[in-house]
Image: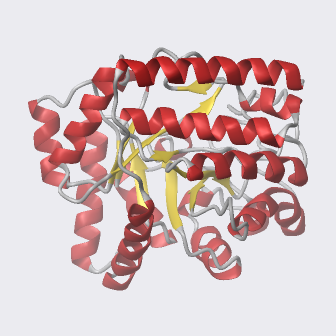
């Protein structure tokens, strides 16, 4: 499991919860982030409480999705990188992001977004988050960003597979439907993934699966891709041959919770082929998911073979993770200067 936390510190109840479920990782959100020192101490506590060194992740895309804007200067948004269309600037943003994350104790960034912009005005939760409206543009910028990020010691996660660019609804509240033929989806939405799976210097080793229905992949029944064996195992694993880490988008989103219990959704996600499920809402929802998965494993619904395979993928990613940098006032000041320089470079590139 990749779980969330309710506050900015590990209180007694949270510590007890972490010790009980021993998650594979934790995702910090805005509610968990106050100051550099506080985040560094929080992440250090997580590493001490969770017995197997955890993934400690954050959504740090820049722009609308900038969890660290109160600590550092705001990072440029993906659509500004897109407007500049400069791979050097994108790589530099990846490097700066990696340095900032490692200074605070993070080791995974839930970025870059690989969705292709079909309609920039669509109210689908992706405004300002696209890197391009063509496969070539997204691969060029996302690949450069990923190279900078991973060279800096932070693993990137490509999202939202198979692609949300053509969606018209926001999966935070509703289940989007993505139309188009299978061939359309392969050539438009999935192509950035296949390109980055094979790039030597910017190889994508982790993927997040979207909560959206793809009739061309799953038929008319409104099944989210995140719960679809056709998408996760059949397409991503078998057809595309992806051997990296596969995680769900947060199951605590309206696209999932409006139609099913979170515990059942977590089990379905594992049955579909995921290595990890993300649940970041309340302790009650995280506990329900954990209990349902534990029972499903006991009952054999989640097989030992699947657990071993998932553990292998998780262990491989964790073996790639880098330790935190030392945090001090000088490092924070230097990072703020680098972010300001990056913004200036971006303005000159436009």
Q: Could one spot residue 75 in this view of the protein?
A: yes
Q: Position of residue 138 (x, y in %)?
A: 81, 48
Q: Could one spot residue 219 in this view of the protein?
A: no
Q: Considering depth in this image, is 155 or 270 the residue closer to the camera? A: 155
Q: Is residue 147 above or below residue 336?
A: below
Quarter of the N terminus within the rendering: bottom left
**Residue at 33%, 35% in the rendered image:** 326
* Residue 102 location, quadrant: top left
Q: How many marks?
A: 0
Left or right, residue 147 beside residue 32: right
Left or right, residue 317 beside residue 198: left
**Residue at 21%, 75% in the rendered image:** 298
Quarter of the C terminus within the rendering: top right
What colour-coding does the image apply? secondary structure
Q: Is residue 104 above or below residue 114?
A: above
Q: Considering depth in this image, is 192 or 341 the residue closer to the camera? A: 341
Left or right, residue 98 beside residue 78: left
**Residue at 41%, 60% in the rendered image:** 276
Q: Position of residue 93 (x, y in %)?
A: 67, 35
Q: Considering depth in this image, is 35 or 167 the residue closer to the camera? A: 35
Q: Position of residue 168 (x, y in %)?
A: 77, 37
Q: Position of residue 90 (x, y in %)?
A: 74, 39
Q: Is residue 150 above or below residue 90?
A: below
**Residue at 51%, 46% in the rendered image:** 256
State the residue lying farthest toward the bottom.
Answer: 305
């Amino acid at each position: 499991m990749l779980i969330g936390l309710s506050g900015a510190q590990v209180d007694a109840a949270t510590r007890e919860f972490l010790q009980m479920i021993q998650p594979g990782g934790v995702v910090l959100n805005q509610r968990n982030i106050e100051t550099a020192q506080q985040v560094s101490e929080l992440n250090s506590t997580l590493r001490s409480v969770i017995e197997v060194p955890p993934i400690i992740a954050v959504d740090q895309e820049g722009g609308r999705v900038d969890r660290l804007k109160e600590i550092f200067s705001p990072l440029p948004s993906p659509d500004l990188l897109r407007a500049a269309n400069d791979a050097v600037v994108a790589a530099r943003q990846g490097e700066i992001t990696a340095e900032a994350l490692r200074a605070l104790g993070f080791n995974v960034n839930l970025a870059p977004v690989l969705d292709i912009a079909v309609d920039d005005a669509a109210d689908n939760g992706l405004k300002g988050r696209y890197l391009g409206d063509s496969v070539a543009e997204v691969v060029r910028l996302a690949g450069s960003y990923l190279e900078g990020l991973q060279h800096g010691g932070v693993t990137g996660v490509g999202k939202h597979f198979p692609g949300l660019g053509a969606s018209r609804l926001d999966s935070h509240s509703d289940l989007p439907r993505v139309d188009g033929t299978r061939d359309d989806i392969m050539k438009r939405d999935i192509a950035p993934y296949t390109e980055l799976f094979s790039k030597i210097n910017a190889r994508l080793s982790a993927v997040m699966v979207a909560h959206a229905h793809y009739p061309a992949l799953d038929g008319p029944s409104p099944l989210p891709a995140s719960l679809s064996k056709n998408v996760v195992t059949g397409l991503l694993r078998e057809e595309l041959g992806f051997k990296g880490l596969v995680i769900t988008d947060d199951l605590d989103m309206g696209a999932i919770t409006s139609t099913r219990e979170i515990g059942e959704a977590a089990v379905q996600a594992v049955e579909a082929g995921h290595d990890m499920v993300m649940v970041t809402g309340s302790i009650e929802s995280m506990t329900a998911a954990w209990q349902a998965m534990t029972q499903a494993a006991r009952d054999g619904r989640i097989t030992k073979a699947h657990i071993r395979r998932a553990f292998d993928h998780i262990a491989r990613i964790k073996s790639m993770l880098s330790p935190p940098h030392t945090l001090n006032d000088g490092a924070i000041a230097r990072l703020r200067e680098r972010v300001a320089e990056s913004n200036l470079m971006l303005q000159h590139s436009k």
